[in-house]
Amino acid sequence: MADVHVAEELWSTGMQPEGILERWFVADGALVRAGEAVATVRIGEALHDIASPTSGRLTVLAPVNEVIDPGCIIAEVHA
């Protein structure tokens, strides 16, 4: 299993203490490939795609419009 997390570096230039999970590109339970964009988050005015760290089946942990913090885990990928 691998965690899909929102990298803390995305906040390095922003003043926002948190972000919003805007959209999932794949459904819960879908098969994903390593490096595939699975979600997008909004931090301030910027949108950032979040990629799967490995290939496998995605388990969504955070719903759309969830407030997210730096480094938080939004999903898991099971081989």
Image (cartoon, grey):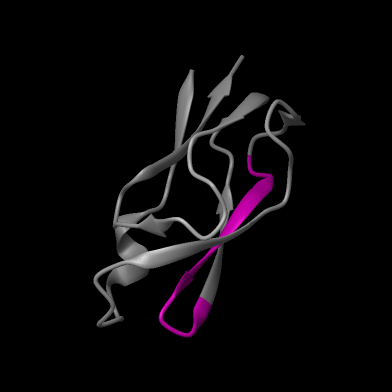
Quadrant position of the C terminus in the picture: top right
Q: Position of residue 52 (x, y in %)?
A: 58, 39
Asked if the magenta segment contains residue 18, the reply would be no
Q: Position of residue 23 (x, y in %)?
A: 64, 58
Residue at image position (72%, 51%) is 25
Q: What segment is highlighted magenta in the picture?
A: 35-46
Residue at image position (55%, 73%) is 47
Q: Is residue 67 left or right of residue 58?
A: left
Judge whether 27 appears above or below 11 on screen. Answer: above
Asked if the magenta segment contains residue 36, the reply would be yes
Q: Position of residue 66 (x, y in %)?
A: 45, 55
The extreme top residue here reads: 79
Q: Is residue 78 left or right of residue 67?
A: right
Judge whether 66 appears above or below 42 on screen. Answer: above
Q: Position of residue 8 (x, y in %)?
A: 30, 58
Q: Is residue 35 left or right of residue 4?
A: right
Q: Main secondary structure of the magenta part?
A: strand
Judge whether 63 appears above or below 77 on screen. Answer: below
Q: How many marks?
A: 0
Residue at image position (75%, 29%) is 30
The answer to which quarter of the image holds residue 18 is: bottom left
Near-viewer residue (75 or 66): 66
Q: Is residue 28 left or right of residue 13?
A: right
Judge whether 44 appears above or below 41 on screen. Answer: below
